[in-house]
Image (cartoon, rainbow, N blue to C red):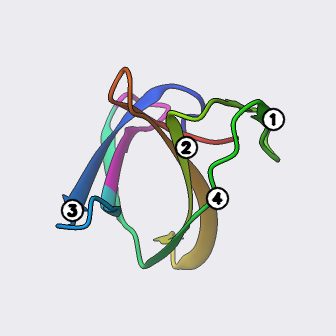
C-alpha cells in the first residue's frame, strides 16, 4: 500500500460532526486502484505539536484514525490521517 501519498476515502459525516471512514482506494505498484472496506476504526485523540507513532507530525487540524481492513484474506491495521485544512486523506507508514 502506498504510504504518505494522498488516497481516496469514502466516509460518512454524522450530524454531530464526526467523520466515519468507510472505504479506502489506493493505487498499487502497477498503478491500478485497489479498494478496501474499513471493518472497524477508532479516532485518535487530537493533540497538536506531537509526532505520531509512524512519524507524522500532528497539528490540531489533523485527525488520525486507526482502522481495520482485510487484505489478501488477512486482517490488517492501518492508520489514516485527514488534514481538515487541505481536505486530503493519507495513509500512515
Residues packed near mark 4 inside 10 Å, few (<14), some (14 to 19) or many (20 plus): few
Nearer the observer, disc 4 or disc 2? 4
Q: Secondary structure at mark 2?
A: loop
Query: Which residue is depicted at the point 69% across and 35% down?
Result: 48
Residue 86: percent from the left, percent from the top? 36, 20
State left or right for residue 88 relative to residue 54.
Answer: left
**For the magenta stretch, what is the residue range?**
24-31
Q: Nearer the viewer, residue 8 or 45?
A: 45
Q: Find the residue positioned furthest to the front.
A: 16
Does the CB distance between marks 4 and 3 fall below 8 Å?
A: no
Q: CA distance from mark 3 to mark 1?
A: 27 Å
Residues packed near mark 2 inside 10 Å, few (<14), some (14 to 19) or many (20 plus): some
Does the CB distance between marks 1 and 4 fall below 8 Å?
A: no
Nearer the observer, disc 3 or disc 2? 3
Q: Secondary structure at mark 3?
A: strand
Does the CB distance between marks 3 and 1 fall below 8 Å?
A: no
Nearer the observer, disc 1 or disc 4? 4
Residues packed near mark 3 inside 10 Å, few (<14), some (14 to 19) or many (20 plus): few
Q: CA distance from mark 1 to mark 4?
A: 13 Å
Q: Earlier in the sequence, mark 3 or mark 1?
A: 3
State left or right for residue 30 relative to residue 11.
Answer: right
Does the CB distance between marks 1 and 2 fall below 8 Å?
A: no
Residue at the disc numbered 3: 12
Residue at the disc numbered 4: 45
Q: Earlier in the sequence, mark 1 or mark 2?
A: 2
Q: Earlier in the sequence, mark 3 or mark 2?
A: 2
Query: Is the C terminus in the top left, top right, bottom left or bottom right quadrant?
Result: top right
Q: Earlier in the sequence, mark 4 or mark 2?
A: 2
Residue at the disc numbered 1: 51
Tally of numbered discs: 4
Residue 1 — which label?
A: 2
Q: CA distance from mark 1 to mark 2?
A: 21 Å
Amino acid at each position: 500500500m502506498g504510504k504518505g501519498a494522498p488516497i481516496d476515502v469514502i466516509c460518512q459525516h454524522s450530524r454531530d460532526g464526526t467523520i466515519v471512514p468507510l472505504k479506502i482506494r489506493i493505487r498499487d505498484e502497477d498503478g491500478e486502484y485497489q479498494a478496501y472496506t474499513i471493518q472497524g476504526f477508532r479516532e485518535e485523540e487530537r493533540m497538536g505539536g506531537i509526532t505520531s507513532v509512524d512519524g507524522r507530525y500532528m497539528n490540531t487540524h489533523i485527525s488520525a484514525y486507526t482502522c481495520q481492513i482485510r487484505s489478501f484474506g488477512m486482517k490488517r491495521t492501518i492508520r489514516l490521517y485527514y488534514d481538515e485544512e487541505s481536505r486530503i486523506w493519507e495513509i500512515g507508514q
